[in-house]
Amino acid sequence: MVSRWRSLLVGGAAAVLFFALQAFLNRDLASGHAPAIEGPTLDGRPAALDSLRGRPVLVYFWASWCSICRAMEGKVSSLAGDYPVLTLAFQSGDAAEVARYVKDRSLDWRVVLDADGVNGERYGIRGVPAFFVLGPDGTIRSRSVGFTPEWMLRLRLWLAAG
């Protein structure tokens, strides 16, 4: 009986610590109406978020030097098959470097280059990966930094649909 209570206390403490850490990491992230994203995608198209309105959208900040971002690649690609996804290569080099990385990793993403971090600054990014789920009206419905399971992103996108 004592070990059962101990297990519950340890699990509860771990959950409280996890949510406290998430609140700390997310404290400066943008909220409300999604800030504009400036710059073309790697294929030269404009990255206007307004063109994606009407459905939930995932805005994903990542970096080529980020190991957690590499672990998220398959999950983001899977989500991109079902939802509009706009990715931003945060401080990952120039257009040629990012294009080579995307090609080498076989990523079929809409990628905006954020070499100087201006878009990331608008969104309050301090670390990557960072995820923003936008509702059909362009408001930020959820946001998170760090590894986020695909099922949780799918749930957030589904809830954002209203």
Image (spheres, rainbow, N blue to C red):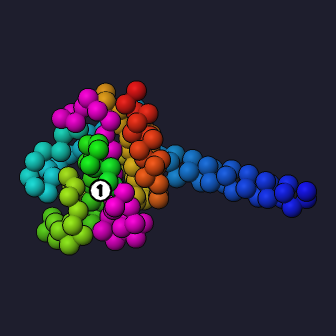
Magenta-tinted stretch: 50-75
Q: Is residue 119 left or right of residue 149?
A: left
Residue at the image point whose x is 21% and y is 67% from the top: 106
**Image coords of residue 59 (percent x, y):** 32, 46
Q: Is residue 56 left or right of residue 13?
A: left
Q: Is residue 68 magenta?
A: yes
Residue at the image point whose x is 26% and y is 43% from the top: 84
Mark 1, residues whose alpha carbon is within 10 Å: few (<14), some, or many (≥20)? Answer: some
Relative to 150, residue 137 above or below: above
Q: Is residue 110 magenta?
A: no
Q: Is residue 4 visible?
A: yes
Tag 1 residue: 77
Q: Is residue 130 left or right of residue 11?
A: left
Helix, strand or loop at mark 1: helix
Which residue sits furthest left?
A: 44
Quadrant location of the C terminus in the rendered image: top left
Q: Is residue 124 visible?
A: no
**The quarter of the displayed image where residue 93 is located:** bottom left
Relative to 65, residue 154 above or below: above
**The quarter of the displayed image where residue 18 is located:** bottom right
Residue at the image point whose x is 28% and y is 49% from the top: 80
Q: Nearer the viewer, residue 37 or 52?
A: 52
**Image coords of residue 96 (percent x, y):** 13, 69
**Image coords of residue 21 (percent x, y):** 59, 54
Q: Nearer the viewer, residue 88 or 75?
A: 75
